[in-house]
Image (cartoon, rainbow, N blue to C red):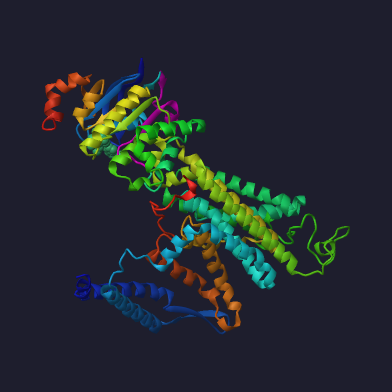
Amino acid sequence: MATGAAESRDVPFATILKNAVLTALVALILAIPLVGFETVASGAGSLTVRTRFDWVAYGTLAVFFGRLALGFWLARRVPPSSTEPGFLTRAAVFGSLHAKEIAIVGILFAVVLPFFSSSTVVYVATSVLIYVMLGWGLNVVVGLAGLLDLGYVAFYAVGAYSFALFAQWFDLSFWEALPLGGILAAVFGLALGFPVLRLRGDYLAIVTLGFGEIIRIVLVNWGAVTGGPNGILNIPGPTFFGLPFARNAPSGQTTFHQFFGIDYAPIHAGIFLYFIILALALLTNWFTLRLRKLPIGRAWEALREDEIACRALGLNPTNVKLSAFAIGAMLGGFAGAFFATRATFISPESFTFIESAMILMIVVLGGMGSQFGVVLAAIVVVTLPELRKIPILEWEPGQYRMLLFGMAMVGIMIWRPRGLLAHREPSLRLFGRKDGAK
Amino acid sequence: MTMLSIEGVHTFYGNIEALKGVDVSVETGEIVTLIGANGAGKSTLLMTICGRPRASKGRIVFEGRDITGTETFEIVRLGISQSPEGRRIFPRMTVLDNLQMGAISTDPSYFTEDLKRVFTLFPILERRQEQRGGTLSGGEQQMLAIGRALMSRPRLLLLDEPSLGLAPLVVKQIFEVIREINEQQKVTVFLVEQNAYHALKLAHRGYVMQTGQIALQGTGRELLGNREVRAAYLEGGH
Ligand SMILES: Nc1ncnc2c1ncn2[C@@H]1O[C@H](COP(=O)(O)OP(=O)(O)OP(=O)(O)O)[C@@H](O)[C@H]1O
Ligand SMILES: [Mg+2]
C-alpha cells in the first residue's frame, strides 16, 4: 500500500513550471546588475563599461532548468521514512553516548599531534584551536543563552588590543596581560549588554552587528593609541616560565633551548603556542560544561524556553542575559590576547565582520550547544582554505570561500536546521540514567 | 489578618480595560477562589498581582507592603508564587531541572527538604524526574507546574486553572493536593477556576468576576447555593 501511494503520486507540472519561471525571473533580476555589466580598463587609466548579456542569458537558463529538474526530483522522490535516522543523526547519538571516550581520544590526539607534524600543520592546528575556543565562547551566548550576537569579533579585538597595548606601554608579559584582556573584554560585554539586552532577537542582532563595526572603526581612527590602520607591531611572544624562545638570548637572559641544552629550532615556539591555546580551549570547554550544570546555566536554558515563566519564578532576565554576554565576551577576550601574541602583529583588518560571521558559522554548523560539533565545524572552516597549499589541489578556494560557506549554510538550513551534529536527546532512557542518578 | 488586599485595581491592555476597579482580599490561611466566564479578566488579575501587566490605578498590598510597582522577579522573593495559565513549564528541560528553576530565588540549603515535600505531594514526579517536561501527560504537567511554584516556599500560592483539560479523576486528585498544601503546609491559596463546583466546595470564600469587575462574593457554600451562580456556572455540570 505504501509503495503504491508513492508510485501513483501525481507530478504537478503546472506548479513546477511556475516555480521554475519565478526562480529564473529572480535570477535574471539579480544577474543583470551583478553579471550583466563589467568595467574594464581601457588604455590610459580610464574605465569603460562592457555588457555581458549573453552570460546573463546562460545563467538564467541554467537556473530555469535547474529549478525544473529539482522540482521533478522533489515530486518523484519517495519521502524518507522519518523513523530511520540518517548517518549524521546516528553519529550525533553515538557521540552523545560515548562523549567521554571521544573526548579522551580527541585530547590524546591533540596532545601528540605537534610532535609528529611539520610546522605548517602545527600552525594550522593552532588556528583551528583559536576558532574552537571562539566557537565555544560564542556558544555560551548563542547556544546556551539564545542571544544572537553578530559582533562577537569586537570582544576578540578588545582582548587582542588590550594585550598589545599593555605589552607596549607597560611592558606586561603575555601571562600578566592575558587575564587583563579577558576582564577588559568582559567589561565591554557588560557595557554593551546593559543597554541592549532589553531588545528582542532581531534587534539585538542588529545592535551587536553595529557594535562590532564601531569597535573596528575606532581601532582604525584612533591612531594615537591603536596605531590606526597600521596596527601594532612587535607584540612579544609568550615565555616559558620566563624563558624566551629565541635563537640568541637577549642580554642577561637564558633562552628556552639554552636552558634545556637542546638545539634551537623555530618549531619549539610554535609547539609551545599550540599547547597554550590547547590548554585555553580545554579550559574554556571545561568551564562552559560546568556552567551548564550550575543554576546560572539552567537559568539561561530556561530563559530561552520561556521568559515570562522565568520572571514569575523570580529571575531577573536582564541580569541573566548579561552574565552570558559577559562570560562569552571574556572568553573571546582570552582568545584575542592569544591571537595577538601569536601573530606578533595586529591591525583592524583582522577584526572585520567576516570574522564574526565565521565564528557564528562554526557554532551554527556544529549544532548549537554541541561542544563536539564546534570542533568539527572549526576544522572544516579553517582547513578548507588551507587545502590550496597541497599541490594536487591547486584551486583557489580563497576566492570561493564565502560562496562555499553560503552554500553550506543553505544546505544545513534545509537538511539539518539544528546543526550538523545536533540531535534530540532521548527523553527517556531504557537502561540507566545519565549523570549517574541512581 | 489580611494577607493580600487588592484595592480598586484597573488594568489596561492598550486601550482595552481588562480590569475595571477590582477589590479582592485574601486572609492568611484561606483558600479563596475566583470564578467567572472566559475573558472576564481572571488571569489578568493574577498576572497584575505579579506586576505583569501593571495596575494603572489602585493598590495591591501584600502583608502590609505595597507591591503595586514592585518588579515581577522581586515579588517572588516576598513570598508570592504563581502557577500561571497554561502551566508554562519548560518543555525541553527535565522535571528535576524544572523544579530546580522553581527554587532559583530561594536559599539553596532548603532545596533537598523542599524537593522531598513536592515529591511527597506528587509521587509521580519523583519517578519521572529525568523525563523532559514537555513529554509529561497534561495532568503530570499540571502537577509539575504546582510543584515548581511550591519550590520557592511561597506563603501565598496563585493558581490559574489547575484543572484545565484534566480528566475528572485527576481533577479530584489535584484539588485534594491543593487542600493538603493549604492545611498541612499552611500556604494561603488564591485559585482561579472554571470548574466552579469543585473550586467552591474546596474554597473558604469565593468571588465571581464579570467583565473586569467583581459581581458577587461570599463563602464557598453561599455561592454554591446562589441561584445566579448555579444558573451561570453550575448548570449541567452538577
Ligand atoms: N496580552 C493581552 N493583550 C490584549 N488583550 C488581552 C491580553 N490578555 C488578555 N487580554 C484580554 O483581556 C480580557 C481578559 O482576559 P483574561 O485572560 O484575564 O480572561 P480570563 O478571565 O482569564 O479568561 P479565561 O477563563 O478564558 O482564561 C480578555 O478580553 C482578553 O482578550
Ligand atoms: Mg484565564
How far across and how far down the image is residue B29, in percent?
34, 19
Ligand number 2: quarter of image: top left
Assess whether residue B208 is covered by the magenta stretch: no
Which quarter of the picture shows residue A239? bottom right
Q: Position of residue B76 (x, y in %)?
A: 42, 30
Q: Residue at x 41, y 74 (%)?
A: A33
Please say whether residue B65 is one of the residues in the magenta stretch.
Answer: yes
Picture coordinates of residue B123 (x, y %)?
35, 36
The outermost residue toward the right is A252
Nearer to me, A58 or A47: A58
Count of marks overlaid on the render: 0
Q: Nearer the viewer, residue A256 or A203?
A: A256
Residue numbers of the magenta segment: B64-89
Quadrant assignment, res A126 = bottom right
From what the image shows, is residue A83 above or below residue A394? above
Residue B152 appears in the rendering = yes
- Quarter residue B180 falls in: top left
Q: Is residue B31 left or right of residue A321?
A: left
Quadrant location, the N terminus of chain A: bottom left
In the rendered image, is residue B217 in sight? Answer: no
Residue at the (71%, 51%) spot, across then down: A177
Query: Residue drawn at (22%, 36%), measured in percent from left and top?
Result: B169
Q: Position of residue B55 (x, y in %)?
A: 34, 29
* Left or right: where A139 falls relative to A11: right
Q: Is residue A374 above or below residue A386?
A: above
Relative vertical location of residue A301 with respect to residue B185 in this rendering, above or below = below
